[in-house]
Image (cartoon, grey):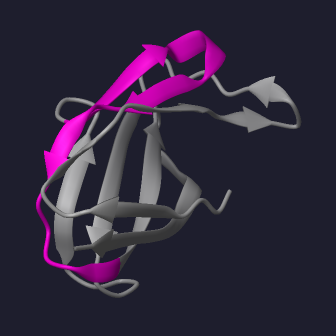
Amino acid sequence: MNLDFTHRTGNTFSDVPFQIKLELVPIDLTGTTISMILRKEQGGEPQLTWTDTDGITITSAINGQFKIDSQIISLPVWNYFYDIVFTFPGTIIKTYVSGNFNITY
C-alpha cells in the first residue's frame, strides 16, 4: 500500500492507525516486529526510525492492527521516503506500507 504524509516540522504527529490485510483477511501480527524508517532517498541512510518498542504500538495483533504513536517530529524540511517493515516469526520480512513523508515549515 502506498500512503503519503505531509507534516509540519516541530509539530505533533497524531496517532495514525493501520490494519494490514491480505485478500480482506487481517494478517496476524503475533510475534512480529514492526519498524518504520524515514530516509532522504530510497535505500539511503535512516533519518528517523520507529519500532514497536519505540514509536509504534501493536494494538490488536490477531486483527493486524497497529498505530504510529503520537509524537513531535522535528526533522529538517525534506520530502523523505518511508517504509514500514514487518519481520514475522521465522525471519520472514515484508514491506506492506511505503510512501512519501513530506516535512514542511
Q: Quadrant of residue 6?
A: bottom left
x then y, percent, for residue 11: 19, 50
Query: Is residue 91 among the parts visible in the rendering?
Result: no
> Is residue 68 inside the magenta stretch?
yes
Name the quadrant of the C terminus.
bottom left
Q: Quadrant of residue 12?
A: top left
* Nearest the eye: 100 or 66: 100
Relative horizontal placement of residue 36, taking residue 92 as reference (left or right): left
Please say if 79 is above or below 75.
below
- Name which residue lies at 47% across and 26% down: 66
* Nearest the eye: 16 or 41: 16
Relative horizontal placement of residue 99, taking residue 69 as reference (left or right): right
x then y, percent, for residue 70: 26, 33
* Nearest the eye: 34 or 19: 19
Please say if 75 is above or below 26.
below
Relative horizontal placement of residue 44, taking residue 48 as reference (left or right): right
**Label tally:** 0
- Name which residue lies at 27% across and 85% down: 44
- Name which residue lies at 51% across and 15% down: 61
x then y, percent, for residue 4: 54, 64
Q: Given the current orientation, which residue lies at the most extreme front position?
A: 105
Q: Tell me where the magenta segment starts and ends, as one range.
A: 55-79
x then y, percent, for residue 15: 37, 31
